[in-house]
Image: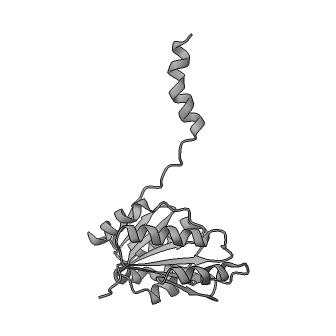
Amino acid sequence: MSDLDTSVLIVCRDDEEHVGHLIRRVAGHLAALELRYEILLFDEGSGDNSLALLSLLKRELPQLDVFAGVDEGRGFVRGAELARGRTLLLLDARSEAPFSAVGFALQRIREGADAVIVAGRYLVLHRIRALRAHDTLVHHRDTLELERRFVRRARSLGLEVAVAARPSPPTPWARIRNTLLSPIASSAR
């Protein structure tokens, strides 16, 4: 049995603007949950400064391992092979994922789910049980397509996949303000 709770798999390509912030957010959130974790980042041929940024970040975050030159679309598959954590958290470097649902997803895994998909954001998988469906983890920039392919394959293998609802977009402040002020405006007439 692994001594790590979670392996975070991140796939990137020309994502220097996003990847550092994402890694810090993930590390901070998992540390707050008091989890033992590793972050495995798979660079699928960046031509920008992503790798230079990641080498600097590696100095301050020993849980981070960076794998350069991974064939395009194979980062998650390679990550599933190398991961040591009991659960896998799959992220795209451009993800603006809210990590508030990670605790919920990990709890569902502990209760017996093989995979939990936080719709449109990320996947959380039980590493051993869900590996039977890992051949569908070929990365797409379209996270929804990755999810659909994984869900179809996992369910065809009899795996239990929980799907958390897609978070609704935040309500624009102007609409909230107008809703709050409308009773005042109508009573002043």
| Residue placed furthest toward the top | 189
Quadrant housing residue 56: bottom right
Q: Residue at x 52, y 29 (%)?
A: 179
Position of residue 55 relative to residue 94, above or below, is below
In the rendered image, residue 78, in percent from the top left (x then y), is placed at 52, 87
Q: Please provide percent x and percent y for residue 92.
A: 56, 71
Task: Report x, y in % for residue 93.
Answer: 58, 71
Looking at the image, residue 15 lies above or below residue 69: above
Q: What residue is shown at x 53% (from left), y 77% (from top)?
A: 10
Q: Residue furthest right?
A: 47
Give the residue drawn at x 60%, y 35%. 174
The front one of 99 and 77 is 99
Q: Is residue 141 left or right of residue 123?
A: right
Where, quadrant-wise, is the N terminus in this rendering?
bottom left
For the residue pair 144 and 90, the one nearer the viewer reads as 90
- Locate the C terminus by quadrant: top right
Q: Is residue 41 visible?
A: no
Question: Residue 71 location, x and y as percent?
Answer: 63, 87
Q: Residue furthest left?
A: 111
Instruction: Name, please, the residue furthest toward the front.
Output: 60
Q: How is the image coloured?
A: one colour
Residue 140 seen in the figure: yes
- Tally the marks: 0
Classify residue 92 as left or right of residue 153. right
